[in-house]
Structure formats: structure tokens, C-alpha cells
Image (spheres, rainbow, N blue to C red):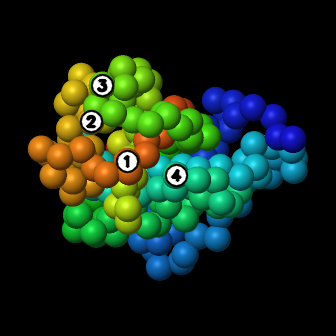
Amino acid sequence: MSAPLTAADGEVLAGLAAAAVAAQLAGHPFAGHPADGHPPTSPLHAPGATFITLSTAGQLRGCIGSLEAQRPLYRDVTRNAVRAMTDPRFRPVNHTDWPHLDVSVSVLSPPEPIPTPTPETLLAALRPHVDGLTLTSGRRRATFLPRVWEKLPTPEQFVAALLAKGGWPPARWPPGLSAHRYTAREFHNLAPRPTWR
């Protein structure tokens, strides 16, 4: 059984994410490994689910992650950091972005189901600025991290925007919708950085 994740562990993870981005920019894919001295019982080795958010001057440049724990935490972080660089919603992150690039790691808790969600029960179950939310119906799935509450501060706004993100019609509640909430711990590796040479 691994120990709880500490703030120092979070700093390691954020550093690993930034190192993975730097290695990819340099053309040397980063295999990813925890810093020396972390024992096998460290939470860095435990299975974990993470999202990596890349931004410059507050503008999103990529956000990619895992909703379920499928690999060691440190490997999930480095894998998602590289994937976030080519988030299809944005142009790929390149060398000119590096000096201004903020790297954030969100470590997700295990998902908690919200039983038989209706519009009313879903809104009532959400804890603003605490919960992330994943909605699934058929082959469609969409999620918002807890940090999205900063832009969508009410449950009504949060859920409506997530339904739109998933491509569900606004006037019709998705059939067979399932909902899971989760929390996230955030760790950051922030700009400014040296100009890329």
C-alpha cells in the first residue's frame, strides 16, 4: 500500500511533466522516472489518474489526461504531458511557447458515481469548486476538472457547458446518462523559463 501523496511528491510530478515537455521539444522523448530516493511504496509508483494542463499567459494550450488509474502515477504524468502538447483543439506547443509555458498536474481521486442522475439530483450533488464531473451516455463522454468552476461558477452553468462539450442537445436530457464526480489535487511548474536554445 502506498503512502499518501505529499506536497513534495506533487512538486516532483509537476517537474516530471515539465521535463517531459522539454525533452519532447528537444526531440528526445522522455521515458519518465521518479527522482532517486523514492521507495517502491511511494505514491509516485502507485496507479493514478492525472490530467496535464498547459497554458501561456492564462490561455489554454492543451489539456489531456486519464480518468481511470491504469499505470504508475509518474508514467501517467509524463505520458499525458506529451499528449497535451498536441491537443487537437490548439496548435501544437513549440519552442516559442516554452519561456511562457505553465504546466499544471491534476491528480484525480477515484470517481464516485452519482446514482440515477436527473437534472435536479445532479445539480444538488455537485460541490462547486470541489468536484470534477464526468458524464457518459452511449459512446459519448465528457469531463470538466474542478478548476473549470473558476469560469463556470454555478452548478447550472457547469452542467450546461459540460453537456454542450459532450455534444448532447441542450433541450433533451441524454438517455441513460451516468455521472461520476471526483476531486483533484493540483501541482504547478510555472513560467518564466529560459529562452529555448
Disc with the residue nearer the chain's start (3 vs 1) = 3
* Residue 1 seen in the current view: yes
Identify the mark at residue 177; answer none if there is no mark.
1
Mark 4 or mark 2, whichever is nearer to me: 2
Front residue (pair 97, 34): 34
Kindly identify the amino acid type of the residue bearing the numbered disc 4: Leu
Mark 1 nearby-residue class (10 Å; few <14, some 14–19, many ≥20) = some
Identify the mark at residue 120; answer none if there is no mark.
3
Q: Residue at x 69, y 30 (%)?
A: 6
Mark 3 nearby-residue class (10 Å; few <14, some 14–19, many ≥20) = few
Q: Is residue 19 above or below residue 149?
A: below
Residue contact between numbered discs 4 and 1, judged by CB atoms under 8 Å:
no
* Residue 189 seen in the current view: no
Front residue (pair 122, 108): 122
Front residue (pair 138, 87): 138
Mark 2 nearby-residue class (10 Å; few <14, some 14–19, many ≥20) = many
Q: Is residue 67 above or below residue 183?
A: below
Q: From the viewer's perspective, is 99 left or right of 43? A: left
| Residue 139 image position (x, y, % from top left) | 38, 65
Question: Label 4, on which residue?
Answer: 67
Question: Label 2, on which residue?
Answer: 159
Residue contact between numbered discs 3 and 1, judged by CB atoms under 8 Å:
no
Kindly identify the amino acid type of the residue bearing the numbered disc 3: Glu
Mark 2 or mark 1, whichever is nearer to me: 1
Q: Is residue 31 above or below residue 182?
A: below
| Residue 153 image position (x, y, % from top left) | 24, 23
| Residue 117 image position (x, y, % from top left) | 39, 35
